[in-house]
Image (cartoon, rainbow, N blue to C red):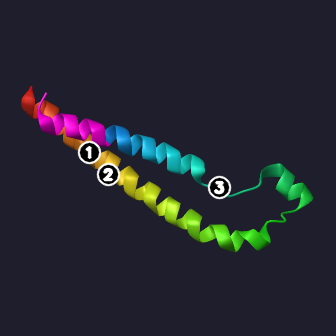
Amino acid sequence: MSIIEIISGIVLILAALAIVGLTLAQESKGKGLSGAIMGDNSMMEAGRTRAKDAKMAKATKILGIVFIVVTILVSVLSVMKG
């Protein structure tokens, strides 16, 4: 294994873990059936968390792109090597 393959493998693992962490940290968009029946009382706090959720969603998208690019890079490197 070359140093580039090792580094790209580490980047892949870190990007995958970061995507999972950011996805789990984001709040769900809907409140489900209980929100439809009982009503939604979170209008006061919605403005506070909306900016944070937007930043986390943008970071998740960027990490997804990094993940795809590094995956393609690793595939190309393995084909060129073998």
Nearest to N terminus: mark 2 or mark 3? 3
Dividing the image into 4 quarters, which one contains the C terminus?
top left
Magenta stretch contains residue 3: yes
Residue type marked 1: Val
Report x, y in % for residue 70. Answer: 26, 45
Near-viewer residue (50 or 68): 50
Disc 2/disc 1 C-alpha distance (Å): 6 Å
SS class, disc 1: helix
Q: What residue is pinned by disc 2?
A: 66
Q: Secondary structure at mark 2?
A: helix
Instruction: Look at label 2 and name its amino acid.
Output: Val
Which residue shows up at 83% across the image and 56% down it? 35
Name the magenta segment's main secondary structure.
helix
Q: Are marks 2 and 1 in contact (CB under 8 Å)?
A: yes
The residue carrying pointer 1 sits among few (fewer than 14), some (14 to 19) or many (20 or more) residues within 10 Å by Cα, namely: some
Is 22 located above or below residue 6 in the figure? below
Q: Which residue is mark 3?
A: 27
Left or right: where 43 falls relative to 77? right
Look at 13% across and 27% down and name the residue there.
1
Residue that mark 1 sits on: 70
Marks 1 and 3, how far apart at CA:
28 Å
How busy is the neighbourhood of tag 2: few (under 14 within 10 Å), some, or many (20 plus)? some
- Range of residues picked out in magenta: 1-11
